[in-house]
Image (spheres, grey):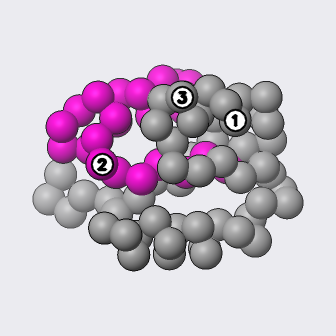
């Protein structure tokens, strides 16, 4: 809470919660609504669902990892 993240990178499949639902919660809270959320997941069928809840990007595992840093740098330079 004292040092909020600049961005969130997560998978759709999380141990205790669905990443799409977590993104929806982040986007619905005023303190985290503008936080860029990027998904890295092998569940490519969920790519559209992540966009619908406000994700800034979706990268397919493992091929998309090479685009992660440039994507984050682009997102963070906008803020």
Quick one: SS at disc 2? loop
**Is residue 61 depicted above or below 19 in this figure?**
below
For residue 4, which quarter of the picture?
A: bottom left
Quick one: SS at disc 1? helix
Residue 35 seen in render: yes
Residue range highlighted in magenta: 15-40
| In this picture, residue 34 sits left or right of residue 11 | left
Mark 1 sits on what residue? 47
| Image location of residue 5, percent across then percent down | 32, 60
What is the distance, in whole Å, between disc 1 and disc 3 at their CAs?
A: 9 Å
Q: Quadrant of the C terminus?
A: bottom left
What is the distance, in whole Å, between disc 2 and disc 3 at their CAs?
A: 15 Å
* 52 in the magenta segment: no
Tell me which label, 2 or 3, sits earlier in the chain. Answer: 2
| In this picture, residue 7 sits left or right of residue 33 | right
Mark 3 sits on what residue? 52
């Amino acid at each position: 809470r004292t040092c909020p993240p600049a961005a969130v990178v997560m998978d759709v499949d999380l141990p205790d919660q669905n990443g799409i639902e977590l993104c929806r919660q982040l986007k619905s809270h005023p303190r985290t609504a503008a936080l860029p959320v990027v998904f890295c997941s092998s569940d490519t069928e969920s790519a559209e669902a992540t966009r619908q809840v406000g994700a800034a990007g979706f990268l397919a595992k493992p091929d998309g990892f090479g685009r992660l840093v440039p994507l984050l740098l682009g997102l963070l330079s906008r803020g």
